[in-house]
Image (tube, rainbow, N blue to C red):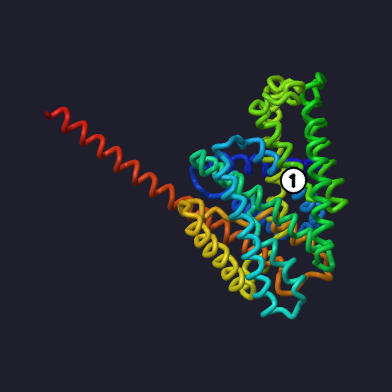
Amino acid sequence: MTLNIIIIICVLLLLAYIFDLTASKTKIPSVILLLFLGWIVRQGFLLLDFQIPDLTIFLKLFGTIGLILIVLEGSLDLEFDKSKLKTIRNAFLISVISISVISFILTVIFQLFQSGSFKNCLLNAIPFGIISSAIAIPSVKHLPARQKEFVVYESSLSDILGVVVFNFFLFHEVVNLQAFGHFGFQLLILTVISFVATIILSILLSKIEHHIKFIPIVILIVLIYAVSEVFHLPALIFILIFGLFIGNICRLKEINLIKKLKPEIINKEVNRFYDLIKEVTFLIRALFFLIFGFLIETQELINPSSLLISVLIVAIIFLFRWAVFKLFKMEINPLAYIAPRGLITILLFLSIPKVMNIDFVTKSLIIQVVILSTLVMMTGLLISKNKQSGKNSQSEKKDLDQSSNTIEA
């Protein structure tokens, strides 16, 4: 039995790798295929009359670790300099506006359909306002660097800000000046911890000469995140600061403190560290979505009672996003379509205490919003690719005509 399980897991992960390899050509996000694959495995279990195990605890575990690694991978991939300030500013403002407005609109809608308190409705609405970096970042590998950078910044900031806002309302029964003061103090503490931890981890990265050096550092990162979360600190900020710091350490080498850290040595190690993080991130992300797909029941997937509201939620998300991009005078195609919901939405939904759950927000609703928003992203990327291909073809034809005229002359 154990060998059979190992065989199944290996086959599923190899298929996940194939999905990842072909995603840039098929434009089908690997998450859709992973969810479908997990669901197929469940149907196989039912057909063979096997007992369906409860894997919810593994979903939370892989989701949390996946979130850490995805934000870390995204931050390591970012080049931070003055030329990026406008992109970062726009990504930050769009993230804040989107989370705030979409959460408020959905809170009002939930209150119309559900007689719950404003706070409970808001807690259930916030997860829908957050872009999933777990889906967005891998889906834009083929885009131009400028567009890719925006998606990485926006989705990472959306994850961080969304979790911070969610935890703020979750752990404060009364929202007043005292609550904001307490939150500001927590933020200050975490910022100090982040800088100290980042310096220590950077020193370890350059000093450890043992052949095993990156896994202990990853474990320390996860440990710092977990301890910060226990004390309700916005822990993802630490991940972002650490990734940005070591990923851009050569740009800071003029600072005396940075010179002592031997940035040239660290930079070489960071490249190897980044390769490891990408591989581990792929593994954890694949396992998360396979498990989530396995936990999907067919009646939840096609539940007609939640389908109408899920379509409404997705429509609100993308219509508002279109309006915000118009306001900021940013290109609509394909960026306005890249707003999938996914890992973080599922994680926060699972984190809501049962007493704060509202009946209106069900697992069916979450599944449908995740799939529909991802399908909209896929459609937008396909449309954008076709338009770009058409422009390139016209440009090539024009150049060819000009060359012919030159030869004739």
Quadrant assignment, res 152: top right
In this rendering, the answer to whether 54 lies above or below 157 is: below
Residue at position x 51%, y 41% in the image: 146
Return the residue nearer the eye: 111 or 276. Answer: 111
Q: Secondary structure at mark 1?
A: helix
Visible in this render: residue 72? Answer: yes
Q: Residue 336 in the image: state x and y as whole percent.
A: 51, 55
Q: Position of residue 84 (x, y in %)?
A: 56, 40
Asked whether residue 1 is in view, the answer is: no
What amino acid is labelled 1 in the image? Answer: Ile
1 relative to 247 in the view: left or right: right
Q: Quadrant of the N terminus?
A: top right
Identify residue for label 1.
237
From the viewer's perspective, is 193 left or right of 39? right
Q: Is residue 306 above or below residue 9?
A: below
Who's the residue at 69% across and 45% down the image?
Answer: 285
Counting labels gives 1
Task: Quadrant for the C terminus, please.
Answer: top left
* Crowd class of label 1 (few under 14; some 14 to 19; many from 20; radius 10 Å): many
Q: Is residue 383 left or right of residue 254?
A: left
186 lies left or right of 363: right
- The image quarter containing residue 295 is bottom right
| Camera-nearest residue between 194 and 33 | 194
Q: Position of residue 219 (x, y in %)?
A: 82, 36
Q: Is residue 56 above or below residue 72?
A: below
Please name whichever residue, 154 or 96, is drawn nearer the observer in this view of the structure. Answer: 96
Q: Position of residue 66 (x, y in %)?
A: 73, 45
